[in-house]
Amino acid sequence: MPRTHDIEYQAYPRVCALAELTWTAPERRADTEEFMTRLAEHGARLTALGLNHRRVAPPASLKWSPGFLSAATSWMVPDGLAEKLKNGATLKLHFQYQSGAHGLDIQAVELLSDGQAVAADRHAGFTGGQPRQPDYQLALPKDAKPGKLHLRIAAKGAGGNDSQGEIQLSADT
């Protein structure tokens, strides 16, 4: 490689990942999402050190809580995923119950562009003790001119609002 700048980019964050393999307990290494979060945090340290490195985005996820269930909240689609959607990718959502006395009944997920619904997945899903169809997919129509992208989720606690969890987001082309 001709420059130190290029060598740094190839080495980092790989050196951090190698440290993860050698210094982290095997049972903790199994959680790749947690690893990606830690790796993204290393990026701030590498930048502070003035190193040229590949930027690693933390796993995209949204969290729900009793407050989410009582308010009709919409979420902005993270920038990296929004760009992928604008380039023809499909947004995938996976609802993962984590704690609380109640599961989550999901009626629909909509993708909004500048406040207008442009795509929807309207199947009944559930996440909790026995999940049923907790995965949703959305894609922008080919003729859409996307603006600011948000998600609107129609969901309620199954029997009450004591429910917490995470919605994992990914985009595939």
Image: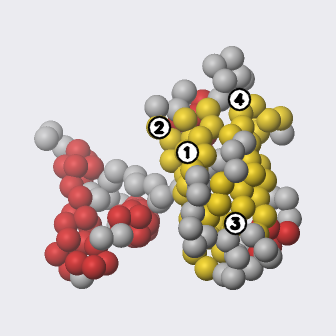
Q: Residue furthest top?
A: 143
- Name the residue rendered at 15%, 39% in the picture: 2
C-alpha gap between disc 3 and disc 1: 18 Å
Which of the marked residues, 3 or 1, is nearer the chain's N terminus? 1
Q: Quadrant of residue 11?
A: bottom left
- Residue 87, how many percent across, how many down? 54, 27
Q: CA distance from mark 1 to mark 2?
A: 8 Å
Disc with the residue nearer the chain's start (2 vs 3)? 3
Q: Which mark is residue 172?
A: 2
Left or right side of 42 for 76:
right
- Please report contact status of discs 1 and 2: CB closer than 8 Å, yes or no: yes
- Could you tell me how far apart the alpha carbons at marks 2 and 3 are, in whole angstroms? 25 Å
Q: Secondary structure at mark 4?
A: loop
Of labels 1 and 4, earlier in sequence is 1
Q: Is residue 22 visible?
A: yes
164 in relation to 83, above or below: below
Position of 93 relative to 98 (above/below): above
Tag shown at residue 146: 4
